[in-house]
Image (spheres, grey):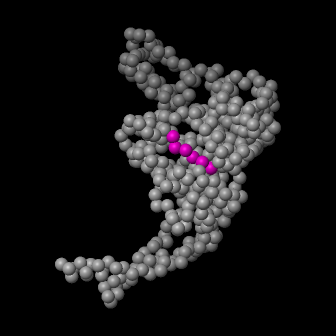
Amino acid sequence: MGDLLDEEPDVIQKDKPYRCLDKLLPHKKELFSYLTRRWENLFNARFDILLYDLTSSYFECDPPGEGQRQFGYSRDKRSDCVQVVIALIVTPEGFPLAYEVMPGNTSDKNTLADFLKKIEEQYGTANRTWVMDRGIPTEETLQTMRNHDHPIHYLVGTPKGRLSKLEKDFLTRSWHQVRTEVRVKLLKQETELYVMARSDGRVNKERAMRRRRLKRLWKRLKELQNQNITRDTLLQKIGAAKKEVGRVAALVKIKLPKEGQNVTAETFSFSLQKAKLKTARRREGCYLLRSNLVNEDPGKLWEHYIQLTEVEQAFKELKGDLSIRPIYHQTDARIEAYIFVAFLAYCLQVTLKCMAREKAPGLTPRSILEKFAAIQMVDVHLPTTDGRHLILSRYTHPNQDQSLLLHKLGLTLPSQPPPKISENAVAENKSCACL
């Protein structure tokens, strides 16, 4: 990390360090441009594949009347709290190019168009591929990307509902093995390519999840059959059970008692919809991808898409290790500053991660910091004959493991700080003399 701080961006002057984040926030754009140059020099980082996603962070405070703190869809399952939405662009290695803080009621599909302009204005026109999950781009935005003066490439996941429309066309196509456990089918349509990828590992995972949830719903319905409850209460409890298992509820057909009828095994029954289950099993482990890279290797397209887990990992680190949630600040300026500090910490963390990947493989940033946390800084106070104190600030000598890790990472501890003389004792003596 020392190399990262060897140079300073133009906006930060050595003789005038920033002491207030309010002065640094307007230069966020220049800071990220500087960081991308440093990452290119340090790690030969590339920025041609951009992973884009959004998350949210909630507040432990009273709801406001205005500002960025708004109610909206909560990724943390805290719909009872106001929140802000955070949009992030990272590379497959985790290097962030930009982020934005938006009101908590911002819709995902309303964010991409502005980011396309910002990235192009900041980093120029280049051959970039945007990788996104479904629900982020609109049809209008994708059309704009295709019709751009310099066509902007994209790879986006699509809802499984679209798979229903294209299923007949895919049936005539043959599978191509692109990885040990991954097969794909290709379908070209005008200026776009649809890729249906099937992962054997994902098949087993989805099948186990569906079986577990289906058993839970079936057990709950059997319990309701034997309860002496009214029809209205039954409807409420069925609704709660369906919400708990999600889409699996569509696989069970429920016959409800008529108005005024008692809840019995005859009036309330349920059965498995085998045709829907068969369709669900046929689609297990399938991803439907959509791209305007019609001549790209389908194996690479699949690899790019699963790299979206990197941006999810970035959100995990921000919310976990860097404690970006919950937020306690009240004003928009302090909210922006708080999140800005968290992202600066994430930039240092991802830099440390890449250093460890090259020089100390197997170690995570957290394990490295835990090892270095044992190095303590202490102040030794030595009284002098004239009533003052000589203060020696010293850090503890690193042990064998710490020294080895410092050597592997190419880090050098700074020199011990010079001694200082405290004037407090003299000032106290003068005050006593005056009294």
User: What residue is at 62 percent from the left and 25 percent from the top?
Assistant: 277
Q: Which of the pair 205/338 is nearer the observer?
A: 338
Quarter the C terminus occupies: bottom left
Q: Quadrant of the N terminus?
A: bottom right
Q: Is residue 36 above or below residue 406?
A: above
Magenta span of residues:
97-102
Closer to the camera, 129 or 209?
129
**Residue lying at 42% horizontally and 43% vertically, measured from the top left:** 59
Residue 230 in picture, x, y percent from top left: 37, 17
Q: Is residue 56 left or right of residue 293?
A: left
Residue 98: percent from the left, percent from the top?
Answer: 60, 48
**Residue 253 position by quadrant:** top right
Question: Would residue 22 be counted in the magenta stretch?
Answer: no
Question: Relative to 136, is 230 above or below?
Answer: above
Left or right: residue 382 versus residue 100 is left
Secondary structure mostly seen in magenta is strand
Q: Residue at x 63, y 70 (%)?
A: 410
